[in-house]
Image: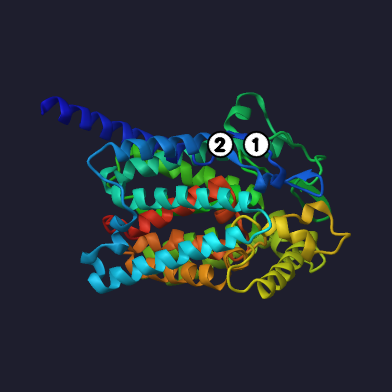
């Protein structure tokens, strides 16, 4: 009996280690890509459709195996939301029935889709991140939250330093960073994200992400968790690390030139600042905010927000994808075009002359969900988000989830890219956990 308990304790320690490693390696994209027929459109390989085995997938698989062989028996209906104690027996039955309806809807959508194989891969990924969210909700309290913040700090500092070097180097660094998922690029690389500031093109850093906006989203969510979880009585070393993370992360976030993420981060900082000092220093706060706003608009970064044209390629591209998705929804209202089938159907809804760069998911997670899963999947998605908000018992967790939803109105990576899916799953799991209350 003693030997079994010792073995189980070792398993728990390994699971904790894997959890921390998963948070640290969340921003990386090391993986093996595969290229079946459905991953190519118009003869061009599309990364979004490529089945990929990431290093983080292997960590999740190890967590699953260890969880199955531990005392915690896995069952989707052990998820806190479906527990009888939380809402009562009748509500639990309705929840299980909703899951069954959704499952059948997704299977039907995949079966009638243009590429069932792509749909099956999408379903596998949905199950993977569903498990991660459930696991996080059930086990996050077994980890020290301050250690979680430190793990995020490691990733944020690493990505921020890399992004700053890329910015001044006008391209990727390669070397050892290649093994963390950094792609080769420079300011002349086709399709690279350059920003125009006062008529001058500026290369936006990528870190180890596939786009500066994804890097910005990761920095924003990670730093928001740190701001909400940091405590006044931190040890000097931990406190210094977290403060350093916020400083260097903010610099890197500004260099990404991601408008929405920067604006949201400034709002978070302003809110925290006002909440802490406004009671006794209201006049000072007003003058401070006016000064910061004036200074920001007077710098080249301010041009990123003031020099916006409806003819900008990014705006035109987004409009085209939104129009295509709306027509796609009208043609497939009930079951959608099938999981992971948006891009496969997209050429039929675009002009023949549309450039290959327009082969992207629609930059709105709600339109993407409705396009691929129809009204049934969309209704479940919205219903689940509403229930998630009602379930949150820690005030500060509202902010990361809200930031994801706001960013999701303008981008798709929380549903389409490994790092975004990992981050979304982790935040949802955090929302459903019984984490102790922490306030800004």
Residues 179 and 399: in front is: 179
Tell me residue 84's x, y (percent).
Answer: 23, 65
Residue sitting at x 15%, y 25% = 3
**Which labelled disc corresponds to residue 53?**
2
Residues 177 and 382: in front is: 382
Q: Secondary structure at mark 1?
A: loop
- The quadrant the C terminus occupies is bottom left
Q: Is residue 144 left or right of residue 168?
A: left
How packed is label 2: few (under 14 Cα within 10 Å), some, or many (20 or more)? some
Q: Is residue 66 left or right of residue 356?
A: left
Residue 341 shows up from this direction = yes
Residue 373 to residue 240: above or below: below
Tell me residue 116's x, y (percent).
Answer: 62, 53
> Which residue is label 1 attached to?
34
- The quadrant the N terminus occupies is top left
Residue 273 shows up from this direction = no
- Residue placed furthest toward the right: 353
Q: Secondary structure at mark 2?
A: strand
């Amino acid at each position: 009996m003693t030997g079994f308990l010792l073995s189980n304790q070792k398993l728990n320690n390994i699971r904790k280690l894997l959890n921390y490693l998963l948070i640290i390696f969340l921003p990386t994209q090391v993986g093996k890509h595969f290229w079946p027929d459905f991953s190519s459109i118009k003869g061009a390989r599309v990364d979004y459709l490529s089945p990929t085995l990431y290093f983080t997938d292997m960590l999740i698989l190890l967590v699953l195996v260890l969880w199955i062989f531990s005392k915690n028996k896995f069952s989707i209906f052990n998820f806190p939301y479906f527990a009888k104690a939380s809402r009562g027996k009748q509500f639990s039955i309705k929840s299980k029935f909703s899951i069954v309806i959704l499952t059948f809807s997704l299977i039907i959508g995949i079966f009638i889709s243009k590429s069932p194989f792509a749909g099956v891969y999408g379903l596998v990924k949905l199950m993977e991140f569903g498990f991660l969210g459930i696991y996080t909700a059930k086990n996050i309290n077994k980890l020290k939250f301050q250690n979680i913040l430190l793990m995020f700090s490691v990733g944020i500092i690493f990505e921020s330093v890399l992004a700053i070097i890329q910015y001044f180097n006008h391209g990727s660094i390669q070397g050892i960073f290649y093994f963390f998922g950094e792609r080769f690029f420079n300011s002349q690389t086709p399709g690279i994200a350059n920003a125009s500031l006062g008529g001058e093109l500026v290369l936006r850093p990528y870190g180890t992400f596939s786009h500066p906006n994804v890097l910005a989203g990761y920095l924003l969510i990670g730093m928001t968790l740190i701001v909400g979880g940091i405590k006044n009585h931190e040890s000097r070393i931990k406190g210094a690390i977290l403060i350093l993370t916020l400083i260097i992360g903010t610099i890197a976030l500004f260099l990404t030139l991601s408008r929405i993420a920067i604006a949201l981060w400034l709002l978070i900082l302003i809110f925290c600042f006002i909440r802490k000092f406004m009671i006794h220093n209201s006049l000072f706060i007003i003058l401070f905010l006016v000064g910061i706003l004036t200074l920001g608009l007077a710098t080249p970064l301010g041009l990123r927000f003031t020099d916006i044209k409806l003819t900008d390629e990014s705006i035109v591209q987004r409009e085209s994808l939104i129009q295509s998705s709306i027509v796609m929804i009208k043609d497939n209202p009930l079951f959608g075009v099938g999981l992971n089938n948006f891009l496969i159907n997209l050429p039929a809804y675009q002009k023949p002359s549309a450039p290959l760069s327009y082969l992207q998911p629609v930059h709105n997670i709600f339109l993407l969900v409705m396009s691929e899963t129809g009204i049934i999947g969309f209704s479940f998605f919205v219903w689940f988000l509403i229930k998630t908000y009602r379930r949150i018992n820690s005030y500060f967790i509202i902010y990361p989830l809200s930031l994801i939803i706001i960013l999701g109105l303008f981008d798709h990576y929380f549903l389409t890219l490994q790092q975004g899916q990992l981050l979304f799953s982790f935040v949802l799991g955090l929302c459903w956990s019984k984490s102790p209350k922490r306030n800004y």
